[in-house]
Image (tube, coloured by chain):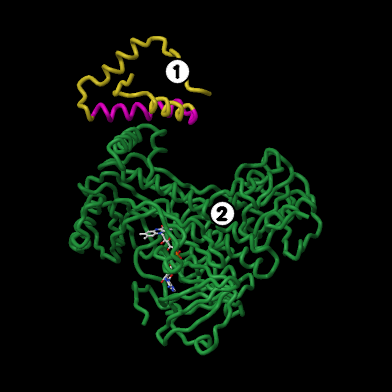
Chain colours: A yellow, B green
Amino acid sequence: MSLILTPNIPDTDGLYQELVEAHDGLSAEESEAFNARLILTLANHIGDRDVLRQAIEVVRKSSGGNVQN
Amino acid sequence: MIEDRYSTASTLYPYCRVSDQDAEPRRHPVVIVGAGPVGLALALDLGQRGTPTLVLDDHEGPGAGSKAICFAKRTLDIAHRLGAAKKMVEKGVVWNVGRVFYGGEQLFEFNLLPESGHRHPAFINLQQPYFEQYLIECIRVEQSKGTPIEIRGRNQVTALTDKGDFVALEVDTPEGTYKIEAEFVVACDGARSPTRDMMGLSFDGRVFEDNFLIADVRMEAELPTERWFWFHPTFAPNVQSTLLHKQPDDIWRIDFQLGWDIDRDKELDPSRICSRVDALLSSQTGDVPDYELHWTSIYTFQCRRMQEFRKGRIFFAGDSAHQVSPFGARGANSGVQDAENLAWKLDLVLKGLAPSALLDSYSSERTFGADENILNSSRATDFMTPKSKAATIFRDAALDLARDHAFARTIINSGRLSVPCVYDGHAHFVQDALTNGPEVTRPGAPCPDAPVEGGFLLDNLKGNFTVLAIGFDCSKLKLIDGVAVDVLCIHKPSEYLQERYLGGGKSAVYLIRPDQHVVGRWPEFSEDKIRAALLTALGKEPI
Ligand SMILES: Cc1cc2nc3c(=O)[nH]c(=O)nc-3n(C[C@H](O)[C@H](O)[C@H](O)COP(=O)(O)OP(=O)(O)OC[C@H]3O[C@@H](n4cnc5c(N)ncnc54)[C@H](O)[C@@H]3O)c2cc1C
């Protein structure tokens, strides 16, 4: 299976809000820990090593913070 | 003069003058440098095959102190063939339950409940000097039967040169030096291998920036025979992790992970060690039982290996060839697998029954095994000693999740069970011809045990090539190209044997190497196919 990179969440705005709100009141450290737990939980759900490898690669290549033109 | 580099647990091979010391250099078929567990296992294996073997060690018995304690099933299986396993299992502590704690709280427990239908448990705990002692006892029994094995204590190899058709060695003793020659030399001289240094060969890898304080404590405690592992233990505020594990003789191994920047002398102060041990014990039992410190030391760990384990007529086996961190117990366990891989090959080459090119497969197979062990123990060590902030965050996330969720428990890594590697795709094995055959017995795999009439399957794999025919009456194979072949016909396979060797089918034929790895397997008996596979296994072109 290949990693889905086209829109795939029925309620994107709702999910986005939920993600951000889950961090409300958390310190920067707690947020990092929360994200790590979330990643591990989602990774287990996906369970497909190929898909996960592709995801890591895609994220590695996306510029993350330093926008370059 | 030969200096003691360490104290010994007992004197098992005292120095004794031999005629070689007064003679012109005498040629020995195999000289093994080092009588550690690997050198001894190799000597026993070679000797039992009838190849004269000389072991030189610069001490007179096994080193005292905290080294290996966990011996895995594969080591017991090999020791069983060599004759030492019974004592190991009788003396050893069998354990199955492990508990993982995070802070003051238990996260989960696991049970290595041994799969049924094997002679040996998954693991036993036994102090390394006992293992070495039992191997020596087997060697003494063999010697009394005339088996050609000799061990010379206080014999230090100080120089060696590969002369092309033999190796010249210089040996130092309390009564001066002498010279010998060998057709083959196996350096089983440990992680600091002087042989490797004398040959100028490199030993590259990673040092883990961490110190482990190891305290072996003698006490009669009412603690269960389990492996307990703490991440961030509350009883030891600055310690990353702690391990508690039982050994025979009421001795408990305690490992404290102290970190990189420590004052070694201060940490080795017995009163400081006792305060750590007191805190651990009182947090578990409420008070501090009587105990004494049996042995203490501080270790740092490395994972590294030589590029090749063969250089001409000189071989490297055990810690001299590869070193791993102890999490997962892969040091001695994998070294014993090196020994069993090399013994039959050297024996057949020396007897002229296999081409010397077969010896290259020792290096290719065992470097492959070493890489797998290094990978596993590096991963365990990286989990325990996270290398970055992100690694720490993920580690702690997994620990937090493990309390409630089974999936996260599988991420927690304080060492994975040591299992032998499968030589998938290696040159001396043939294509799997048994459709739907079980994975565990594919070509390259070590044979798993299974009950057979009167005992266990592995009892019947005695060190020759073996044809295992399940559900067949097979013809009377004896010798192929001069190489002895044992035939084992099983007409009524036990359920376990069916599950592990037949899969769905009704019958199968296996060709198994002397080291109990599967060469090939077929649904039907065909002498031609077995012969061709055997020639492949020996490194001869199939005729
Ligand atoms: C704290 C700790 C815990 C461990 N736990 C485990 C475990 O649970 N399970 C496991 O499988 N492994 C474990 N290991 C690893 C295990 O101890 C080693 O892998 C094992 O000792 C290697 O055996 P060896 O025969 O290759 O070398 P060694 O045991 O080092 O033996 C080498 C021998 O060669 C001799 N020698 C050296 N130079 C010369 C010379 N020039 N001439 C003659 N003789 C010489 C030495 O005196 C010595 O007797 C542990 C190690 C440590 C430190």
- On residue A5, the disc is 1
Q: Could you tell me residue B494's position as x and y percent?
A: 67, 48
Tell me the kind of residue under disc 1. Leu
Q: How would you classify the magenta stretch by its main secondary structure?
A: helix
Residue at numbered disc 2: B364
Q: Answer whether residue B350 is magenta in the image.
A: no
- Give the structural element (helix, strand or loop) at label 1: loop
Count all numbered tags in the image, as a single digit: 2
Tell me the kind of residue under disc 2. Ser
Residue nearer the viewer, A45 or B444: B444
Chain to which mark 1 belongs: A
Q: Could you tell me residue B153's position as x and y percent?
A: 45, 79
The magenta segment is A30-50
Q: Which residue is situated farthest in the right direction here?
A: B475
- On residue B502, the disc is none
Q: Could you tell me residue A11's position as x and y percent?
A: 38, 9
